[in-house]
């Protein structure tokens, strides 16, 4: 997963270092993750935090972009987070990037800026989604 995370062209890790223990905490304690594999090689990943609604990771290796893997990972992760009863999802990304456009096309809204000048985007569950979760 970290190989994919480090391969991206945008939203590169600059301010922080992510370790194997960070992945474990997000996968085993805080939420859940999903991967796309081709021939036993991970080419995409998504990790969502069910404790605070954060999309901690959603990345596709550049060699496999524009094939729908990112949107599939997004949709599965968002559905799972709604099922966990999270009322609002959030993430940060660099402004004026393909990632920003990807999330906005998926219904996310820019709500301000986060540390380091990144954009903060949020996604709120629809009333239909909220009703499904409360049943």
Image: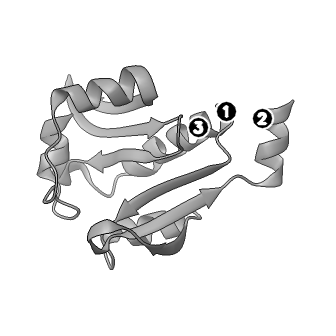
Instruction: Specify few, some or many for label 2: CA neighbours under 10 Å numbering under 14, 14-19, or 20 or more.
Output: some
Q: Secondary structure at mark 2?
A: helix
Q: Is residue 93 left or right of residue 132?
A: left
Q: Using the image, tell me which numbered label, if any, was put on residue 81.
A: 3
Marker disc for residue 83: 1
In this rendering, the answer to whether 70 lies above or below 31 is below
Location of residue 41 (image quadrant): top left
Q: Quadrant of residue 28?
A: top left
**Residue 65, position in %: x, y?**
27, 55
Residue 23, how many percent across, how many down?
Answer: 27, 30
Please give the count of numbered marks on the rendered protein. 3
Q: Residue furthest front?
A: 115
- Give the labeled residue for mark 2: 133
Asked if one can make out residue 38 in the rendered structure from this viewpoint, the answer is no
Q: Earlier in the sequence, mark 1 or mark 2?
A: 1
Q: Residues within 10 Å of mark 1 (few under 14, many from 20)?
A: some
Residue sitting nearer the eye, 41 or 90: 90
Q: Residue at x 49, y 65 (%)?
A: 121
Where disc 3 sits, the SS reads: helix
118 relative position to 123: left or right: left
Marks 1,3: beta carbons within 8 A: yes
Is label 1 in a helix, a strand or a loop?
A: helix
Going from N to C along the chain, the mark reached first, 3 or 2, is: 3
Q: Residues within 10 Å of mark 3 (few under 14, many from 20)?
A: many
Could you tell me which quadrant the N terminus lies in?
top left
């Amino acid at each position: 997963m970290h190989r994919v995370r480090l391969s991206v062209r945008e939203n590169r890790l600059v301010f922080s270092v992510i370790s194997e223990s960070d992945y474990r905490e997000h996968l085993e304690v805080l939420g859940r993750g999903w991967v796309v594999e081709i021939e036993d090689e991970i080419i995409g990943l998504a990790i969502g935090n069910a404790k605070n609604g954060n999309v901690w990771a959603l990345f596709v290796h550049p060699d496999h972009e524009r094939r729908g893997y990112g949107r599939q990972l997004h949709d599965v992760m968002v559905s799972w987070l709604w099922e966990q009863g999270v009322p609002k999802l959030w993430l940060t990304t660099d402004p004026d990037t393909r990632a920003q456009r990807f999330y906005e096309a998926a219904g996310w809204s820019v709500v301000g800026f986060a540390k380091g000048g990144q954009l903060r985007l949020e996604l709120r569950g629809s009333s239909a989604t909220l009703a499904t979760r409360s049943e």
